Image (cartoon, rainbow, N blue to C red):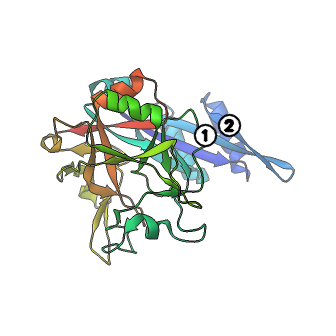
Amino acid sequence: MEIRHRLLQFNNDQVFDLFKSELDQANATYKITRLGQIGSKESLALEFIVSENDELFPLSQSLVARYNILEQVGVHFDEHDFEVAEWFYIVAGEYQYPMGENEDSDYTEVTYDLSNYCHKCGMGKIQNNPFRLKRDFKQRTNQFLGLHYVFGTIFIRHPAKEILTQEGFTGIDYEHPLFAGSKEPIKTVYQMKVNIVLQPGLVQAWQESGKGYVICPLCQSKKSLYPRREAIRFVRSVFPDSFDVVQSSEHFGSGLSANRLTLVSKRFYDVVQKYKLKGLGFTPVILE
């Protein structure tokens, strides 16, 4: 596990050339992505990723300070981290938006019981209806899929559902989403509805700085923020022996985003790798 910094600069001013020139002088490895034409000019993005252990890290911090370059910080897990991990949290790619009665209405009104919903922080909503989507997902080779806004919600194609059932994974219900227009079920895909919610067990060591959580000024609910410089940690005793897919008691997010983590065991991870099921990102969590 190591801390990596991602520096990103677009070619919309002279900083791009200065940034690139200094990286070239340092023999740094970076990536340039072509984003298409804007008028007569081709739009480019330069991405430079560096570990805090790298000899080029001091240069990266100097460039950020001098040129005000966009910088993102995150934890990188190596092969060993995945080998020893017992549990992971999962996310799927976000490929479309949840829908309401029509394109102009709010999806939350037809998807959730909003009796205890806070319009300030997004806490308190309870799903009581299937999600409505504009169309089936276009990503035919992905067995797991996700939506914008609802980051803890995972959808699954029928072949992967059959594999999970065959492998004996329990504690999951499967529900078809609906076409927003006709309200008919989208029969090629299911929502994975996880039934098991853990007892509170998040170890919030990184929150000592006061930057690891937010408290809603309206309802006083507490939401955790994703740590940027360390792994998410849980108390080991809250994890069950009899289930491989659970959700955290705690909610994560900022603004109106408020989602439980979907957590899976190493056995779940191994099955996904065995059958080469596409569409999930796994991040190790540490048990204490």
Residue 18: x and y, percent?
69, 44
Residue at the extreme right = 40
Q: How many marks?
A: 2
In the rendered structure, which disc, 1 or 2, sits on the residue that comes first in sequence? 2
Name the quadrant of the N terminus: top left
Residue 286: x and y, percent?
24, 38
Q: Quadrant of residue 209?
A: bottom left
Q: Is residue 254 above or below residue 72?
A: below
Residue 72: x and y, percent?
49, 48
Per the image, the residue denoted by label 2 is: 32
Per the image, the residue denoted by label 1 is: 47
Residue at the extreme left = 237
Is residue 131 among what the camera can see? yes
Residue at the extreme bottom = 218
Q: Is residue 66 above or below residue 83?
A: below
Q: Quadrant of residue 141?
A: top right
